[in-house]
Image (cartoon, helix red, strand yellow):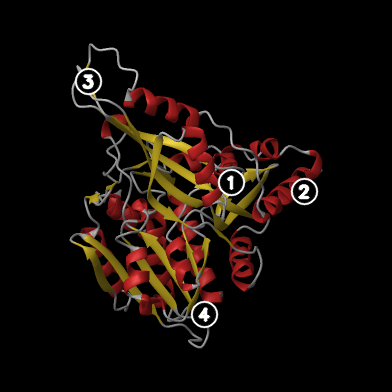
Amino acid sequence: MADELEDTARIARDLIRFDTSNYGSGKSNGESDAAEYLEAELRSIGLEPQLFGAAPGRTSVIARVEGADPSRPALVLHGHTDVVPADPANWTVDPFGGEVRDGLLWGRGAVDMKDMDAMMITALRDLHEAGERPARDVIVAYFADEENGGVFGAHHLVDERPELFAGASEAISEVGGYSIDVAGRRAYLLQTGEKALLWIKLIARGTAAHGSRVVRDNAVTRLAEAVAALGRTEWPVELTGTTEELLAELAKLHGVDPAATDAEELLRLTGTGAGFLHGALRVTSNPTVLDAGYKHNVVPDRAEALVDIRTLPGDEDKVLAEVQRIVGADVEIEILHRDVGLENPFSGRLVEDMSAALRRADPEAAVLPYLLSGGTDNKALSKLGIAGYGFAPLQLGSDLDFPAMFHGVDERVPLSALTFGRRVLGDLLRNC
């Protein structure tokens, strides 16, 4: 079966078999093996890729494809090669086995984002073998460290080697261009923005003591109260321009009045698509890691929690102030990583070309804008004035909970979606 795989599935499978788990805080299995594999694939289609390492094992790949009209601004086509860790005990299959089963490719990275990494190669290969060029210069980038904010990947290259992206005005990458079912019709979500990112540490301090004593100044108790208060917080619904436009289009497809329909109810009608879309309505603040103590009978003098906060673009400072109020003045907040939110218009030539490529492949489809609740390496590229979009086109069945695949157990992607993405991405590159 493996030897009969379509080329996109083969490359995605091979990439999944590189365990590029990123544990954060600089702890990673590294991306070098995957980067060298991609370097060879790019060379096989006549490109001259370069490897860049911000730290040992943390390797990114950059190549430039000459376009038919090099006078136009270049397009950055980028992916990342790291993945979040996976516990094999929770999976039906080996998360790094790249198993093909029931018409799907399984494994960590199958949708985030070794599928798109492979589609990039095969779409460019199709152009190369046809003797064609993309419409404009394309800067192909495979970044390390996206799952930890791009410190050793996109941010490093943007800060230290900005000339690699000279002349680029726009970028496309992950988490957009995939289909959902809306009112019995396929609709593709085109990612035109993403929320801001705040990774913080809560630090509570108290008095160290023997576990048998009455201790009212207990760091663990103080932290637990702060974490519970933050975790129970119901942030209000706030609509950005992108989300208002999405809701208006959804209402039109369902034949309802958007002004008279609750935003959350309207998003629930998108089925599995709601998994991503609900997060665009409000701030999210999820405690993810707790750390305190070192022995059963010792009351520690310090307790810590990690919290993942996603705000609407531009609201970071306002949200930080509110988080401090919620957790209390006696709990310290340390900002570990902060990155901007992005919002681009659902208009202009690139948006029109992405929409047209989808409609040529799926003529009855609707194309809708949305604000991604997560983040991508487009944040780093924005420092160079490059407008980033999510466009990793996949035609999916309504039975697959696609948002749940991201960082989830039994991550998988239909083989048919990979061939669809290859075709649509190649079409876009020819015409944008």
- Residue under label 4, please give it: 135
Query: Disc 1 and disc 2: Cα gap in Å?
Result: 20 Å
Q: Is residue 256 visible?
A: no
Q: Are marks 1 and 2 in contact (CB under 8 Å)?
A: no
Q: What residue is drawn where x is 52% and y is 28%?
A: 232
Q: Are marks 4 and 2 in contact (CB under 8 Å)?
A: no
Measured as percent of width and height from the top left, residue 372 is found at: 54, 51
Q: Which amino acid lies under the numbered mark 1 shown in the image of this protein? A: Ala
Query: Disc 4 and disc 2: Cα gap in Å?
Result: 34 Å
Dividing the picture into quadrants, the one containing residue 146 is bottom left
Dividing the picture into quadrants, the one containing residue 79 is bottom left
Query: Disc 4 and disc 3: Cα gap in Å?
Result: 69 Å
- Residue under label 2, please give it: 252
Query: Disc 1 and disc 4: Cα gap in Å?
Result: 33 Å
Query: Disc 3 and disc 2: Cα gap in Å?
Result: 63 Å
Residue 131 vertical placement versus 364 (above, below): below
Q: Nearer the viewer, mark 4 or mark 3?
A: 3
Determine whether the residue tagged by mark 4 lies in a helix, strand or loop. loop
Q: What residue is drawn where x is 77% and y is 48%?
A: 252
Q: Earlier in the sequence, mark 1 or mark 4?
A: 4
Estimate how packed mark 3 is, as few (under 14), some (14 to 19) or many (20 or more) residues with alpha carbons within 10 Å. some
Q: Which amino acid lies under the numbered mark 2 shown in the image of this protein? A: Lys
Q: Earlier in the sequence, mark 1 or mark 3?
A: 3
Measured as percent of width and height from the top left, residue 238 is found at: 65, 45
- Residue under label 1, please give it: 280
Q: Is residue 137 visible?
A: yes
- Residue under label 3, please give it: 209
Measured as percent of width and height from the top left, residue 395 is found at: 54, 51
